[in-house]
Image (spheres, grey):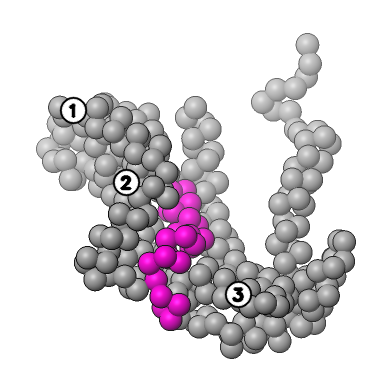
Amino acid sequence: MGTAGIGSRPGFLTYGLLAAFIIGGAYPLWWSVVVGSGTNATRGETLPLIPGGNFLANATKVLDAIPFWLALGNSIVISAVITVSVVTFSTLAGYAFAKLRFRGRDGLMVFVIATMAIPTQLGIIPLFMVMRELGWTGTIGAVIVPTLVTAFGVFFMRQYLVDVIPDELIEAARVDGANQIRTFFNVALPAARPAMAILGLFTFMMAWTDYLWPLIVLSPTNPTLQTALSQLQSGYYVDYSIVLTGAVLATIPLLVLFVIAGKQLISGIMQGAVKG
């Protein structure tokens, strides 16, 4: 029998594969930094590795070419509101589907899951018509409201809470006189925090990088960051050093968020692994 087991340390092959995946995943971002800190001719190099000295100059050109700060503020507001809303409603609904008993619960959960199979592009035209009737086109509310809750968020939190919270713990809270709201905040919410952190991170990232719907419903004078960056390559001649500088500037908030939420993310993954 081999000596590999729970207490054994990973071998050289494991660390080698992990290093290769890390380098392969980080290189596109590094390539963007290198090209963004150089000139348009830099992208012609096969494997550019050394950054140039033009990043600040290119960043200044980005700020002059597009309404960067307005777009950044819109993206922060949209992503933050959507994240808070999705995490809040998904946790509440997930707890209800996981631990409460009510008529039609399973059928309603199947319906929620079935909505995930509908392509987003299929609802763009009717959704735009609704926003036009409400007079919301051109405002960030038209981007926020349709995604205040997601079927994936409800399904994700339901699958997490169904096993992580023992039914006996909920029954003990009820025996002690706690109502549904108090049971949720004192029992379910502490157990759900790792999953909430993961869902919040993914939701913020998806809202931050969303392009199609903001491009349709917002005007060029009130864009999100992703739609504003598309203006950098709308001309006949495209300076890719400027485009990639803008892409790097748009990626920095996500990197900061990953650093801040990394501890909760790892905690949620490890807790799910131990639970499984």
Give the quarter of the image for residue 79: bottom left
In 3D space, how far apart are the residues under numbered discs 3 and 1 (Cα atoms)?
A: 51 Å
Q: Residues within 10 Å of mark 2 (few under 14, many from 20)?
A: many
Amino acid type at image mark 2:
Ser
Q: Residue at x 28, y 49 (%)?
A: 89
Residue linked to disc 2: 90
Q: Nearer the viewer, mark 2 or mark 1?
A: 1
Asked if residue 197 can be seen in this view, the reply is no
Residue linked to disc 3: 234
Residue linked to disc 1: 104
Q: Residue at x 65, y 82 (%)?
A: 59
Amino acid type at image mark 3:
Ser
Closest to the observer, 192 or 101? 101
SS at badge 2 = helix
Vertical side of 116 occupied by 87: above or below: below
Q: Earlier in the sequence, mark 3 or mark 1?
A: 1
Relative side of 92 to 69, left or right: left
Give the quarter of the image for residue 99: top left
Vertical side of 13 occupied by 149: above or below: below
Relative side of 62 to 108, left or right: right
Q: Main secondary structure of the magenta part?
A: helix
Q: Residue at x 78, y 11 (%)?
A: 1
- x and y percent of residue 260 in the render? 53, 61
In 3D space, how far apart are the residues under numbered discs 2 and 1 (Cα atoms)?
A: 18 Å
Residues drawn in magenta: 197-222
